[in-house]
Image: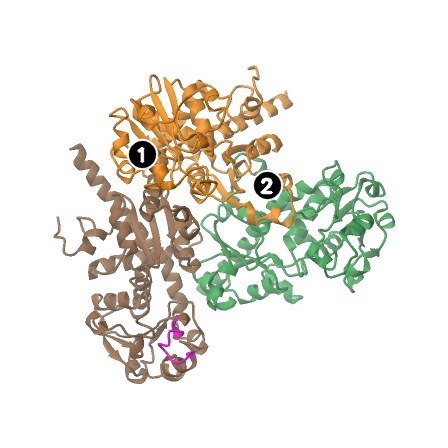
Chain colours: A orange, B brown, C green
Amino acid sequence: MSVVEDPARSIQLTDDGDLRHFLTLDGLDRTMLTRILDTADSFIEVGARRIKNVPLLRGSTVVNLFFESSTRTRSTFELAAKRLSADVLNLDIGTSATAKGESLSDTLLNLEAMASDMFVVRHSRSGAAHFIASQVTPGVAIINAGDGRHSHPTQAMLDMLTIRQHKGGFEGLKVAIVGDILHSRVARAQIRALNTLGVEEVRVIAPDTLLPTDVESLGCRVDDSMQSGLADVDVIIMLRLQRERMEGALLPSEREFYRVYGLSNEKLAWAHPEAIVMHPGPINRGVEIESAVADGPQSVILDQVTNGIAIRMAVMSMAMGGQRATAWNRTGEGSS
Amino acid sequence: MSVVEDPARSIQLTDDGDLRHFLTLDGLDRTMLTRILDTADSFIEVGARRIKNVPLLRGSTVVNLFFESSTRTRSTFELAAKRLSADVLNLDIGTSATAKGESLSDTLLNLEAMASDMFVVRHSRSGAAHFIASQVTPGVAIINAGDGRHSHPTQAMLDMLTIRQHKGGFEGLKVAIVGDILHSRVARAQIRALNTLGVEEVRVIAPDTLLPTDVESLGCRVDDSMQSGLADVDVIIMLRLQRERMEGALLPSEREFYRVYGLSNEKLAWAHPEAIVMHPGPINRGVEIESAVADGPQSVILDQVTNGIAIRMAVMSMAMGGQRATAWNRTGEGSS
Amino acid sequence: MSVVEDPARSIQLTDDGDLRHFLTLDGLDRTMLTRILDTADSFIEVGARRIKNVPLLRGSTVVNLFFESSTRTRSTFELAAKRLSADVLNLDIGTSATAKGESLSDTLLNLEAMASDMFVVRHSRSGAAHFIASQVTPGVAIINAGDGRHSHPTQAMLDMLTIRQHKGGFEGLKVAIVGDILHSRVARAQIRALNTLGVEEVRVIAPDTLLPTDVESLGCRVDDSMQSGLADVDVIIMLRLQRERMEGALLPSEREFYRVYGLSNEKLAWAHPEAIVMHPGPINRGVEIESAVADGPQSVILDQVTNGIAIRMAVMSMAMGGQRATAWNRTGEGSS
């Protein structure tokens, strides 16, 4: 029906252009991103109700397939799946069958054979979720919960949802992303999503050593000063400083980083007075961000967490819907 | 509506005097303890049915927040929550976000933001559950699953339920608590609950080195001899000997402890012929208690376990009810 | 009602001959094995539906009691229990109460007292599941998920289900079992089940050092050559080579084992052209089996995994049914 434009699109969308995996924001257009945000909005309402469960995935099996341990991320997906009424199986693959010398591909085939409907995949290797999506049987949806430096697309989308919630939309917004862009799983996806959704300008603020070489080609302006970078922005996205990176001598010291790039109330004053402050958590207080800012009136950090559940519910239910529609078409064609 | 009498009351009760957290027995009067026991009784019946689930917490999220590992305690709360139809998330915080340098308070804020309704908290530090209750947003209920030496109030209440079951009530009862009172999480709460519920006499039997200095002020008689202490008692509560305490030279040896304080059939004969024998488990057979007694006709140790599920279902459903009523009032006031 | 013939029968069957535990295939006749297969067949259909859950164990509590860790086996039982709508509690006993010095028997009594309905038991010691079944209160069903070298009866039954699915029945079949019979948890049960179900011939193919001494008494023909052993067989069951056994000098080397006993397409050609190839997983590719065979058209290895869920659902629901019927009779007798 629609023309396949690039490989990511062909993997993660059905022929009708619906989501069937959620691997990356690459290849998703403004309409699709907006559909995800709208679906998530409906789950925000559900989260505020006394009974927070909806039966969309009742009788479905969701496997949290974590090759890299992350209690925080796993918990949000586990809660999202349970609120969709799915049965959830948590597998920490580090301690499991692969240890017996089984290949990833055999582990996957086995899990599929157990009639799993969805794998939420976390892996330290870039591209792992794509690889798995290319391997699985039709009918099984893959959700990327972070693969290497490559992507963490639900994180980027929960940020978009938070921005839309507080700013009403994306038109005309100036957004600054501050910190370790180079090692961030999410900065790249954020830049892409912000551009796709039509913001006016994305600025990245970071020392040279923490910037990827091709960063401007993603659609942003590089700034190495907080003062000029934050000037008049509506949204500030602070990135988490991976402390283990500090040892690699990419940076002088945490204290020095904080002095130059840490978000204090003083620096926050350079932004638009109604600017919102975001951070993916967990916060290093006094490293990327001052406590007064993290807990202050402009901080929307906890809204991001709430929105994270809603976004995960949205992409899980949409991908499952896409898989089912495809299966239906396949069966329909087969029987006609 | 009612007058707030002490800080614990103000934290764990609503303005209408209903439970909204369950942190300690301090400040809970006989009416409240009796309500908890009555509610638990109704869940005992549920436990005996083929379908043991009730929908009281359907669509609610209960987080087992264990800063200190305890499979046994966690399992009872997990089962209780599942029988109330809640979604359960087990978090072993030792291995989680706090390890990334996140503060307790940030961890809590994040979990709340995920729309959690209840935290079951286990912590090695006294007062941790209170602290958390003082921090959380209105609407989130805290259940104390043991904090340091301070309190383990569901354990004390399951003991009360077991006594009432077997003795019909508390009036006129003589109760002996035997063993390591000093390090016990539960002895203090037991003494308080027994007095509140109106027993005739509580006796504690322990070597001096295992007695807190202020113990008599809690409302009990200290006895250092088993023979006089057990004379004519209706209920014997044996405490678990924390073997790791033995190394601190507080006691000569396990064998010596058993000789003097271990409950054998010989010593049991000093009590009332229909006395019941209780122990919180896990039992150190041959240290605090002889196998013949633990498995004998006067032992109600396994009833305690069964009652533990019912008590946990009771306080969880009551606290959630209190939080909802409060939220309702808040909303009602807001809209009027 | 019926005459009790042997101890296994008396433990795992009710007076009416229904399953109440599932410990071993010993003592189960062709009618019972066929009932299990038929019940599993009905769950295969359920597994293919969009909503894969049935309410047979709703409100029941299933405890996965794993004294020996096995993520793969635990996952299949966890999924099976959840698809039967049970509440599931996973207990890795290695890290739990027994570590505090509690005996197995006390752990069991405690879990029963929590109103558990079923224990799925995995243990490294032969006979552990039987022992536990002999200890538990009436009403609690025990499912053997592998005990030592003794038995892994759900694995044997999923193999039977897979054979019946692909061959239509057992009459006239020639079946070869290849590899480490001596250390296999499942070979003994397979031989017994195949004979009970009426196959024409069972052959075991293995080096002398990997054969139990009494193997022929189980009802099979020993062959030490793949060529003669595989001649004209309809079913080939490859066993997993426990690599850790290799160090015990029972075998020259993996390469040597593969050369002689590894299933390649070349050797597969000796079998009947429509022979199916089975393996319990996880596969050691290039050790017991060539990848081309494992992934080839005659391989039914992934069907085995799918059937494993169905078989586990079958024995769990049948054993629970037997326990309930017994309880009903007991109550009925008591009240008359």
Residue position for label 2: A111
The kind of secondary structure element at disc 1 is loop
**Is residue A186 in sight in this rendering?**
no
Chain of the residue on which disc 1 is drawn: A
- Per the rendered image, the range of residues in magenta is B245-254
Chain of the residue on which disc 2 is drawn: A
Kind of residue sitting beneath label 2: Leu
Q: Is residue C195 above or below residue A166?
A: below
Q: Quadrant of residue A331?
A: top right
Question: Pointer 2: residues within 10 angstroms few (<14), some, or many (20+)?
Answer: many
Percent across and percent down for residue B59 are: 37, 41
Percent across and percent down for residue A320 are: 50, 30
Residue drawn at 20 percent across, 71 percent down: B219
Residue position for label 1: A263
Kind of residue sitting beneath label 1: Leu
Query: Closest to the observer: B289 or C317?
Result: B289
Percent across and percent down for residue C43 are: 59, 42
Asked if the residues shown at circle 1 and circle 2 are in contact, with their CB atoms under 8 angstroms apart, the answer is: no
